Amino acid sequence: MKLKKEDKKALVKEFNDRFKSAEATFIASYSGIDVEGMTKLRKTLKEASSELKILKNTLAKFAVKGTQAEPLTEHFEGPIAIAFSFKDAVQTAKTLTGFAKEEPNLMIKVGTLGGRVIDLAEIKNLASLPSREELLARLMGVMKNVPAGLVGVLSGVPRKLVYVLNAVAGQKQAGS
């Protein structure tokens, strides 16, 4: 079914807004993946606050204009799927790379992160990072331990003074 010109314009506007609001975007080739596989991938990505969309390359080229994903234009060749990450780019990268291991027909091409184009190696490195929640937990642990260590250091000075005074008192008693 052919789209009308107004529908195409609305679609380009919708995707332009997605490209602008996404923290990261990933482009992948999906030839050979059945509907069940694509549905599974979409569901998994949705759980990671991401979306997987398919758009004609000509419309995608119009949609990226004026966004941080504009350098991706040259990678819009063949059947492509676009994954938009709105919250946690690491989790999206983990989901995509994990699915690509299970499904060899999903070939991740390139992506953007913070306005910078990242290649497959960088996407795999991104996927190997700890999740946002894990990083926050580590930060909270560090923030909790710093004051405790400071208290230990500060209490060490008076403690040592007490030890010295006890030793001096002991020497005076032994000397008397």
Image: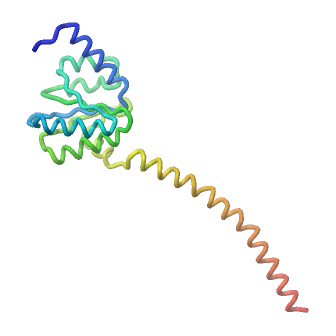
Q: Residue furthest top?
A: 5
Task: Give above or below for 14 relative to 175.
Answer: above
Say which quarter of the image contains residue 170: bottom right
In the displayed structure image, the side of residue 81 where residue 34 appears, left or right: left
Residue 14 drawn above or below residue 168: above
Instruction: Report the front residue among 89 and 52.
Output: 52
Count of numbered marks: 0
**Residue positioned 62% across, 59% down in the render:** 148
Rendered location of residue 140, percent (x, y): 52, 51
Q: Is residue 118 above or below residue 130?
A: above
Task: Locate residue 4 relative to residue 134 in the image: left or right.
Answer: left
Q: Residue at x 27, y 33 (%)?
A: 26
Q: Which residue is rendered at x = 88% and y = 91% of the image?
A: 175
Where residue 160 appears, as percent x and y from the top left, is 74, 73
* Quadrant housing residue 57: top left
The quadrant the C terminus occupies is: bottom right
Q: Quadrant of the N terminus?
A: top left
Residue 46, compared with residue 55, is above or below; it is below
From the top left corner, tell me how far across and down residue 171 is, in percent: 84, 87
